[in-house]
Image (cartoon, grey):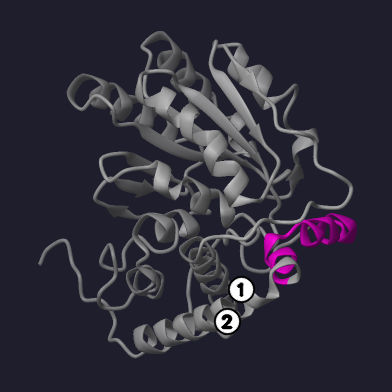
Amino acid sequence: MTETLAPAPATSPARLSRLADDDLALLLLIRHFELELLRLYGAGELNGTTHTCLGQEYVPVALRPLLGPGDFVFSNHRGHGHYLARFGDAHGLLAEIMGREGAVCGGVGGSQHLHRDRYLSTGVQGESLPVAAGVALHLRRTEPGTLACVHIGDGTWGEGAVYEALNLAALWDLPLLVVVENNGIAQSTPTGAQLAGTIAGRAAAFGIGHHLVVSADVNEIRPALEPLVAGVRSGRPLVVEFRTHRLGPHSKGDDTRPPEAVRAAREHDWYDRYAHDHPDHFHPLDARARALVEGVVAEVSARPPSRWSPCA
């Protein structure tokens, strides 16, 4: 078992490095897509629920080139950024959430439940981990060099299925990458009130490696993860824990955090930090992303409702 620890975060977040255009464009696409979802819900244009990844967009962006088309990605209830990083398909995703023609799953999956190629998401906490372990076993036997990546949150460590899956991953040397987006709160419960010990300690109990990420800098995160992900492909399961910040509410407007917690999340948010550190790079691409998402919303909103039926 190996554990790699990143430096502890400074009092003031460090300056972010200049990103490649495609990385910044993807970050901004996810940010403005999520903001538009909250606006659409507030305007009564959407039904059901949604859980945005505001503040956490850099996690799937950092992982994007490290995952190939043969890899499986299992997402969770807060998965729009995972989907957009995988496919870049804002039209299909919004159509799914709005129940319009051209929806990725015919409009029946909504915000949380998506299936496309080797990508699956679910709103059931912990459900994906045992499934991902089974897929990883299949990949080890039939497609060596591919892996199963599963995204979970800090609250999911209260589910027994997590430990059953980790046990099998360690016993069978599965190519399983567990990405933990630890934003410090499980819906309305602070992590310290629901998680005894540490995520690193729980991975260590199974002899599984743990890598902690406290940076929000894609250029810093990605090269550190690249050799570790290569190790997963050879049968060394790994838990990568991102200490991140949930900028928005749990779902739509239900934010129970005290003001200081929300303020701390905003102080660490990559969006304003990058705008401050690289204004010449940020503002043109930000304007482009805003316009792109506005165009997506206008086009998808004009589509007729999806007519998909399992009996068709």
Quadrant of the image for the N terminus? top right
As displayed, is residue 305 above or below residue 137?
Answer: below
Q: Residue at x 75, y 44 (%)?
A: 189
As displayed, is residue 133 above or below residue 65?
Answer: above
Circles 2 and 1: CB distance less than 8 Å? yes
Kind of residue at disc 2: Pro
Res. 196 image quadrant: top right
Give the residues drawn in magenta, as a range: 257-275
Q: Residue at x 30, y 86 (%)?
A: 303
Secondary structure mostly seen in magenta is helix
State the residue in front, 106 or 84. Answer: 84
State the residue in front, 88 or 231. Answer: 231
Secondary element at image label 2: helix
Q: Residues within 10 Å of mark 1 (few under 14, many from 20)?
A: some
State the residue in front, 224 or 109. Answer: 224
Secondary element at image label 1: helix
Which residue was labeled with disc 2?
Answer: 284
Q: Is residue 211 left or right of residue 21?
A: right
